[in-house]
Image: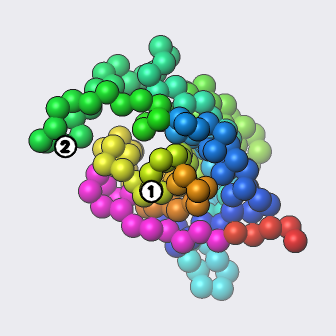
C-alpha cells in the first residue's frame, strides 16, 4: 500500500467529521472516510482525497461486538483493565459493509477510519496501535475537535501525515 504524502478534506468533510465525532461524547465517536487515492500531476506524490464521511456506530461492549474478550493487557506491568466506549471504539460491521457497498456503487473507495479521543490527545494510543490493522491511515480528533492523521506502519511505528482542507469558497 502506498503511503499518502498528505490527505485532502474537500467540501467541509472535515467539519462534518468533527461534528459526528463530537456528537458521540462522552463516548469515542467513529466514522469511515471515503474518497479517492490520487497522484499529484505536478510532483507525482500520492495523496488521498476525502469527499464523504460515513458516520458509524460505536459498538464497543455491545452484544453485537466482534471482540469477545474486551479485557486487554496493554502494559506488561498492569493488570487487565476493562475498557469502555469512553476510551475505545469498535465500528459496527453493518456500517463497514454499507460504506464499502456505497463507495463501490459511486466509484469511490473506503480510505480509512477516524475516531475521537474526547478526553485525550489526537495521537494513537497504545490500544489504538495494538488493535489497528497495519499498515494504514488513522485520523483522530481530540477534545477540541482538532484532527490529525497518522500512518501506522506496525504496532510500534507511526508518523504524522499532513492534512489539507479545501472548501467550495
Q: In the rendered structure, which disc, 2 or 1, sits on the residue that comes first in sequence? A: 2
Q: Which of 152 and 102 is in front in this view?
A: 152
Q: Is residue 124 above or below residue 162?
A: above
Residue 154: give x, y in percent of width and height.
31, 54
What residue did someone put label 1 on?
121
The residue nearer to you, when weighing 61 against 36, is: 61
Horizontal arrangement in the rendering, residue 77 relative to residue 20 (left or right) = left
In the image, which is nearer the foreground, mark 2 or mark 1?
Answer: 1
Q: Is residue 81 left or right of residue 161?
A: left
Q: Does the magenta stretch include residue 155?
A: yes
Q: Can residue 34 be seen in this view?
A: no
* Pointer 2 residue: 75
Q: Give the range drawn in magenta.
A: 152-164
Position of residue 1 measured from the top left corner of the image (x, y, whole percent): 45, 59
Q: Which percent across, then down, holds residue 151?
A: 43, 61
Q: Main secondary structure of the magenta part?
A: strand
Amino acid at each position: 500500500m502506498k503511503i499518502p504524502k498528505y490527505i485532502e478534506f474537500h467540501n467541509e468533510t472535515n467539519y462534518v467529521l468533527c461534528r459526528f465525532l463530537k456528537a458521540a461524547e462522552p463516548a469515542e465517536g467513529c466514522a469511515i472516510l471515503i474518497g479517492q487515492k490520487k497522484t499529484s500531476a505536478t510532483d507525482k506524490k500520492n495523496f488521498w482525497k476525502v469527499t464523504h464521511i460515513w458516520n458509524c456506530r460505536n459498538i464497543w461492549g455491545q452484544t453485537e461486538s466482534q471482540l469477545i474478550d474486551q479485557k486487554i493487557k496493554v502494559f506488561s506491568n498492569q493488570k487487565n483493565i476493562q475498557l469502555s466506549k469512553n476510551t475505545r471504539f469498535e465500528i459496527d460491521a453493518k456500517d463497514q459493509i454499507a460504506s464499502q457497498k456505497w463507495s463501490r456503487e459511486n466509484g469511490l473507495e473506503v480510505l480509512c477510519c477516524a475516531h475521537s479521543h474526547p478526553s485525550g490527545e489526537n495521537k494513537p494510543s497504545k490500544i489504538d496501535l495494538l488493535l489497528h490493522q497495519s499498515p494504514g491511515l488513522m485520523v483522530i480528533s481530540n477534545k477540541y475537535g482538532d484532527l490529525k492523521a497518522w500512518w501506522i506502519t506496525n504496532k510500534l511505528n507511526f508518523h504524522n501525515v499532513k492534512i489539507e482542507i479545501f472548501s467550495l469558497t
